[in-house]
Amino acid sequence: MVRLVLFLVAILLLASGLAWLADHPGRLLITWEGYEIETSVFRAVVIVGLAIGAIILLWSLFRQIWSSPSMISNHLTRRRQQRGLDALSSGMIAIGAGDRTSAARAAIQARRSIPNEPLTHLLRAQAAQLTGDRATARRIFEAMLGSPDTEPLGLRGLYLEARREGEHEAAMQFADRAAKLNPKLGWPLEAKFEMQVKTADWAGAAETASLAKRNGHLERSVAERRRALMLAAEAQRVEDADADKALTCALEAHTVAPDLVAAAAVAGRILASRGQTAKAAKIIQLTWSKSPHPDLAAAYAHARIGDSTHDRLDRIKQLALLKPHDVESGIAWATAAIDAREYGVARHALQPFLKDKLTRRVARLMARLELAENNDAGRARDWIARATTAARDPVWTADGVILDAWSPVSPVSGALDTVEWRAPLTGSDGEAENLAAEIADLLTVDVEGSKLIEDGTENGLTDQATLESPDWQGSPRARRTARIRAPSSAQQGGEDTGGTTPPTAA
C-alpha cells in the first residue's frame, strides 16, 4: 500500500513538473564545434529523459547477455535439485510401502541429482536394507561417519545393523560413541540402558538412567524408578561379596522407592548384622506397610542378634499390626509364635485366614501347629490334605513364569518392573510334589501306638541336633517332615532355650 502511494506521488510530481515547463516555454541554445542546436526547455527535458531511459535499457540487455551462462547453469541446477528432491520423496514413500524396486530406482536417481545430500545417503542405505544388501547399507553408514553433519545418522544406522546381526558389543560401542558425540540424543542412552539390563549390568544401567534424567530424556519419576530398580538389583547381587556397596545401593533405592522389597530386605539384613537395629526396623516397617513379604519378616525377626524366640515374637507382633488383615502378617506372627511355643497366639494369628482366605502356607502352618502342640498326626494330615486344594501362595512371578527371586526385569519379555509378588495364575505347581510327600509321610502313622514311623525314627520326632547331623541318613522326605515336626520335640524338651534359630519358613 505504501509503495502504491509513493508511486502515485511520484507520477503527480512528474506531471506537475512537465506542466510547469509547458507553461514556461523558454529557449535553449547549444553551440558546439560549429553546430548550433536551438530548442525549447520542455523538449530538451523530454529528450534527456528518453536518452536516460534508452541507456538504462541498453545496460539491462547487456547484463542479461553477460550473465546468461550462469543463469542457464542455475536453472539446470535447480531442475536437477528438484528431480533429486522428487526422487527422495518417492523413495521414502516406496520404503514405507515396502516397494524395493521403486526404492532402489529412486535411490539411484537421487544419487545422480543430489549426491551430497544427507537424505540421499539415508535413502540409499534404507533401500539397501530393504533389498537385503546389509554390506552395502553398512558401507554407506560407515561413509557417513566422515562428515560431522551425518555422523550421528551413521552411528544410529550402524547400531541398528549391529543389533540385527546380534553383535551386542559393537552395538554398545556405537551407542556409547553417539552418546558422547551428542548427549542430547535420546536413543543412545535408551539403547545403552536396554543392553545393560540384558547383560545384568545393574550399576551401569543405574548410571545411564541418571544421565537420561539429567539430559531431560526421561521424566523425573520414570528415571528415578529405573535407577531404584537397578540399585536394588545391584544390592541383591553384591550383598555377600561387598556389603558396603550393597548397603549404599539398597539405602538409595529404598529412599526413592520404599515399596521395593529387595532393597529393604538387603538394607535390613546388613544394618542388623552391624547392630543398627533401630534403623533396620524403620526401613523394614516402611516397606512392610506397602508390600508385606516373608523376607522382610525374617529380617525383622532377627534384627537383633541373640534375641530369644519370645523377643522375636514380640517384634513380629508389632510388624504384623502394621498390616493386620494381610495373610503375610498372620503367617509371620504364627511362625514366630510356634517357634516360641505360644500355640494359642499362633492359632489366633491364623484364625482369620482358615476359611475364605486359606492358602497352602497357612494350612501347612496349621499342620505344624497340630503336631507341635498336640502331637496330633491325624489333624496334621488333614491340614496337609487341605493344603492341596487351598489357594496358592504368592510368589515372584512375571508373564506367567514363577521366579526363584525378585528381578527388575521379566525373564520372558524383558519388560522392566513387571515382576510381582502375587499368587500365580498359570504355570506348573511347584509345591505339588512337596505336599504329596508330606501326605505320604503322615500316612505312616501307627494309630494304636500314636507313633510316627519314618525311616526307623520313632514317635515321628527328630530333634534338631539329629536333623542337622551329617551322619543322619534319613530320606529327603523324612527330612522335610522332621523339619515340620521339630517343634514337638522342642516342646518335650522343656522351656524355651532362647536360641537364635530363625523361624522355620512355612
Image (cartoon, grey):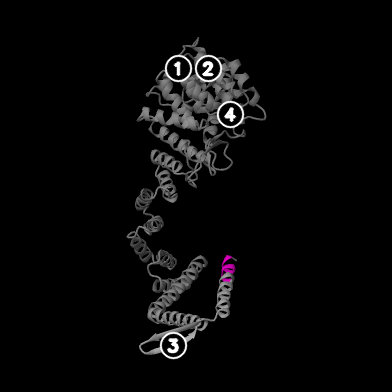
What amino acid is found at the position of numbered circle 3 in the picture?
Answer: Ile
Give residue 328's quadrant in the image: top right
Part of the protein shown in magenta: 2-7
Q: Nearer the viewer, mark 1 or mark 4?
A: 1
Q: Nearer the viewer, mark 3 or mark 4?
A: 3
User: Residue 109: which numbered mark, if any?
Assistant: none
Measuring from the top left, give residue 94's x and y in whole percent. 50, 69
User: Residue 304: which numbered mark, if any?
Assistant: 1
Q: Which residue is mark 4?
A: 384
Q: Is 390 left, or right, of 466 in this rendering? A: right
Q: Main secondary structure of the magenta part?
A: helix
Measuring from the top left, give residue 499's x and y in whole percent. 45, 14
Give residue 359's quadrant in the image: top right
Q: Are marks 2 and 1 in contact (CB under 8 Å)?
A: yes
Count of picture labels: 4
Identify the mark nearer the N-term, 1 or 3: 3
Q: Is 12 left, or right, of 136 in this rendering? A: right
Question: CA separation, marks 1 and 4?
Answer: 33 Å
